[in-house]
Image (cartoon, helix red, strand yellow):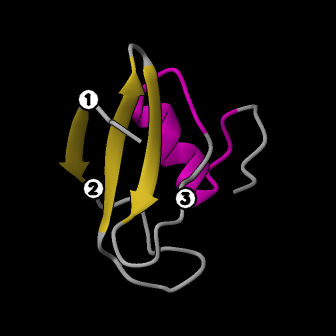
Amino acid sequence: MSAIEHHPVSGGPCPFCRTLDVRSIEIDSAVWAVYCRQCGAIGPNAASEQAALQKWSGQPDGTSAGI
C-alpha cells in the first residue's frame, strides 16, 4: 500500500490488538481509512478522514461500521 498521508488519530483502539497506535491514511485522492501500526489491520474506506474515523470507531453515520 502506498498511502499519500498518515495522521495520528484518537479514533479508538484497534479492534484486533487493542493498541492505540492507529493512523488515518489517504490511500488515494479522497479515499481514507484508519490502520493499525501494530498489527496492520485496516478499517473500511471512506470519502473523508472524518468518515473513516467514524467507521473505525463504530459511530453511526448512516453506513456500515464493519471492519
Residue 49 belongs to magenta span: yes
Q: Residue at x 59, y 80 (%)?
A: 16
Q: Nearer the viewer, mark 1 or mark 3?
A: 1
Whether residue 26 is in magenta: the answer is: no
* 39 relative to 56 in the view: left or right: left
Q: Earlier in the sequence, mark 2 or mark 3?
A: 2
Image position, residue 33 (x, y; %): 47, 41
Q: Amino acid at mark 1?
A: Ile
Q: Is residue 58 above or below residue 4?
A: below
Specify which label sits upstream in the sequence, 1 or 3: 1
Comparing 18 with 27, the one in front is 27
Q: Amino acid at mark 2?
A: Val
Residue 4 tag number: 1
Q: CB of mark 1 within 8 Å of CB of mark 3?
A: no
Report, in whole angstroms, how far the alpha carbon at label 1 lies from the one at label 3. 22 Å
Q: Give me the residue at 53% from left, 65% from top.
A: 41
Q: Is residue 19 above or below residue 60?
A: below
In the rendered image, the vertical position of residue 43 relative to residue 25, given as above or below: below
Q: Secondary structure at mark 1?
A: loop
Image location of residue 25, percent across then percent down: 34, 40
Task: Name which residue type carries label 3.
Answer: Ser
Residue hosting label 3: 57
